[in-house]
Image (cartoon, rainbow, N blue to C red):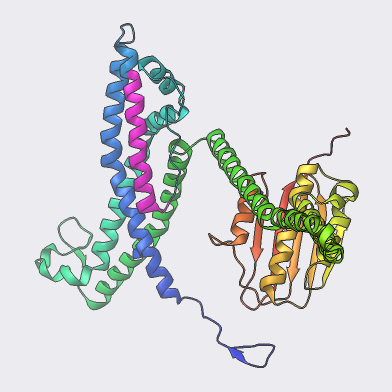
Amino acid sequence: MNTLADGSRQEVPQGRPLWRSAALVAVGPRTLREGAHLLLNFPVALATFVAAVTMLSLSAGLLVTFVGLPLLCLTLVAARGFGFLERARARGLLGSAVADPAPLLRRGDRRGLFPWMGSVLRSGQCWRSTVYTVVHLPWAVVTFSAVVVLWSAGFSAAAYPLWFWTLPENHRPGINVDGEGGGWVWDSPGEVLLVMVAGAVTLWLAGWLIRGMAVVDRLLVSGLLGPSSDEQRVRQLETGRSTVADSSAADLRRIERDLHDGAQARLVALAMDLGLAKEKLTEDPEEAARMVDAAHGEVKLALRELRDLARGIHPAILTDRGLGPALSAVASRCTVPVRVEVDLGERPAPAIEGIAYYTVSELLQNVSKHSRASGAVLDVWRSDDRLLLRVEDDGVGGAGTDRGSGLAGLSERLSAVDGLLTVSSPAGGPTTVSAVLPWRERNAG
């Protein structure tokens, strides 16, 4: 039991019993799935090895003719297709989520036999998949043999009390000393129990070995059948570009909506009021003067709305004075008292400065709307080639980057520039949101 600050007591969850942990290692769902994967390695690897070696040999022999090169490309594509099946098997049995590679031909690529063959021969994924079909067989023999031997011995020994009595007395397992049947036969209760314990220990050791061999399988699948680091980087950049484009489009729609519903509508009404005042100028000068005075007030409101909109696009204080004063201005508009600590010896590039500003603006807006906090702290500092931001409040907690939340969108926008957002917000608080951005030097010009 733990005593909390309010005097109440909370039950502390106890650890899993030792016998249960050992049983999960020996015959738990994870061990059974991974063992099944290792057993399937041999028949799958044997079939693909024979097919790949046969087709590669045939292709090499026919390279002197026109048929050899297309056949080699078909071999590479077949190995690539096998990679899809192996990734699916690894996902289902090993829980290893390896991403599929990019398509061979992208949109806009030329179609036809020779462009297709060129893309196949240049594809590192095709060659790595082919290498996997060749090198996987020796490892598959090792895993299959180890699992068959250990599981056969372990399960038969663990179940020894269920079957040993069905054998004739002179054929029961034991230790033969003189080669003529003399020795010990394992049929007494103590000996049966000892065999059973030995079987359980064998299964436990087999479980650890299976988990270790499954790690090697995961490395083989991710290293040879997964996308290369360059492909992953291209995907990240494409995803980041898409996120930035969507964010920019949303910002443009927001600005258009604000102009249409705010300043534009106010200016239209102002033009109509001034037109009416012009008509009444000769008939009723006092009413015209009152209408012009009201129009003057509308002009001030329109100017204020345009100024606020311009500040939302890019605040002048950020351009003129940098992150410290700009973030202090943002913190002053927060409904929760915010202590601001900015430790920057120089200013980063304008793009990074702008992202940092809007990140802090959104985080402080979340503090105002959702935290129910009595205070918050904003820290900004530089560490080597990184700009770090941290917003901490003493509110109710429960924030997260679940899909659809504002923090999820903010995390996607930061990842588009190689940034990172982390959230620590247990129920009851406190909430700490940290952002990391790449530091880019400000151009002298």
Q: Main secondary structure of the magenta part?
A: helix
Where is the N terminus found, in terms of image quarters? bottom right
- The residue segment tinted magenta is 72-96
In terms of image quadrants, where is residue 127? top left
- x and y percentages locating residue 112 in the rendered image: 36, 17
Q: Tell me: residue 202, above or below residue 85.
A: below
Q: Is residue 26 magenta?
A: no
Q: Tell me: residue 327, above or below residue 88.
A: below
Question: Which residue appears at 84% of the width and 39% of the height?
Answer: 442
Q: Is residue 85 magenta?
A: yes
Question: Which residue appears at 41% of the width and 50% of the height?
Answer: 214
Where is the C terminus found, in terms of image quarters? top right
Q: Closest to the observer: 66 or 141?
A: 66
Q: Is residue 345 left or right of residue 79?
A: right
Q: Tell me: residue 83, above or below residue 120.
A: below
Question: Which residue appears at 41% of the width and 17% of the height?
Answer: 115
Q: Closest to the observer: 276 or 216?
A: 276
Residue 186 visible in this rendered orientation of the protein = no
Q: Is residue 254 left or right of residue 302?
A: left
Q: Is residue 422 left or right of residue 169?
A: right
Q: Tell me: residue 198, above or below residue 49.
A: below
- x and y percentages locating residue 71 in the rendered image: 30, 18
Residue 61 visible in this rendered orientation of the protein = yes
- x and y percentages locating residue 286 in the rendered image: 87, 66
- x and y percentages locating residue 241 in the rendered image: 60, 40
In terms of image quadrants, where is residue 10? bottom right
